[in-house]
Image (cartoon, rainbow, N blue to C red):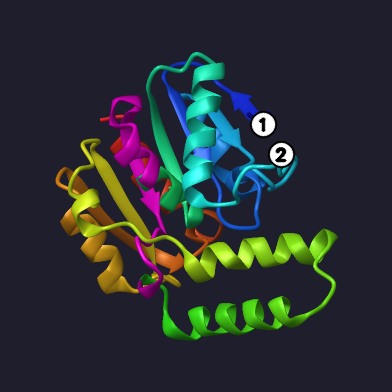
Amino acid sequence: MIKHFYIEEGEGNPLIMLHGNGESNEYFSKQIGVFDEYFRIFALDTRGHGKTPRGEKPFTLNQFADDLLDFMNDKKIEKADILGFSDGGNIAMIFAIKYPERVDKLVLNGANFNTKGTKWYFQRLIDIEYKIGLKKADKSGKRKRKIELLSIMVNEPDIPEEDLKKIKAPTLVIAGTRDLIKRKHTEEIARLIPDSKLCIIKGNHAVARMNPREYNKEVLSFLTK
């Protein structure tokens, strides 16, 4: 079990924030100081990201979901709202499928349930960069970490549609108008999850940073109902 680096702010019901691939909890800098008026915020650095150690276990979304369970158990959090961005959203989906009793509400921002969900030009760039990285002889240090990060985007997620239908938590599916995730794919996530709401707001993949005012309004409206 690893020890996550995290930011804890506010009081009330717990809200866990999960950042995207290659990032840290700093991604939510425009949310934490707003949401902490309503919730007890836990903004984590995922395994091998930010200030959280890599550890020895597999570097996969499934492992990150199990890490989240360990974190909640360690902090004695029985149930929480979970907000996940990009790969953080994918971790949140996997967690909600595996551990439904530990999730209150779910916010999936710019998530995808398989690699076909990302726009072709972005996925192509990632595939090329990954193949180039594998061919290089030196796979130590920063280069090894980069390959691991790219590996997740090349090979994951791979969540069956039937599993999405099993998610019990009320869910907000939110994305930007110019997101890296295909609009039809985002709509499909909202269609497959039974108790879900779809929200598309002006912005790109990093809509929480680029359009925080509208983003925060929509997310808080959903979580505080």
Q: Which residue is rendered at x = 45% and y = 47% of the image?
A: 91
Q: Are marks 2 and 1 in contact (CB under 8 Å)?
A: yes
Mark in front: 2 vs 1: 1
Q: Residue 18, how many percent across, how many down? A: 52, 43
Q: Which residue is rendered at x = 32% and y = 57% of the image?
A: 159
Q: Nearer the viewer, residue 135 or 103?
A: 135
Q: Residue 81, how many percent across, how many down? A: 38, 31
Mark 2 or 1 closer to N-term? 1
Return the residue at label 2.
52
Q: Residue 120, how many percent across, how many down? A: 43, 84
Helix, strand or loop at mark 2: loop
Q: Which residue is rendered at x = 70% and y = 76% of the image?
A: 134
**Going by the image, does 45 lie left or right of 40?**
right
Return the residue at label 1.
2
Say few, some or many: other residues with alpha carbon within 10 Å of mark 2 (under 14 / 14 to 19 / 20 or more).
Answer: some
Q: Quadrant of residue 101?
A: top left
Magenta residues (range): 94-116
Helix, strand or loop at mark 1: loop
The residue type indicated by label 1 comes to Ile
**Going by the image, does 213 lie left or right of 200?**
right
In the image, is residue 67 above or below residue 63? above
In the image, is residue 49 above or below residue 75? below
The reply to whether the magenta stretch includes residue 191 is no
The reply to whether the magenta stretch includes residue 109 is yes
Residue extending farthest top: 76
The residue type indicated by label 2 comes to Thr
Q: Nearer the viewer, residue 69 or 138?
A: 138
Q: Nearer the viewer, residue 213 or 15?
A: 15
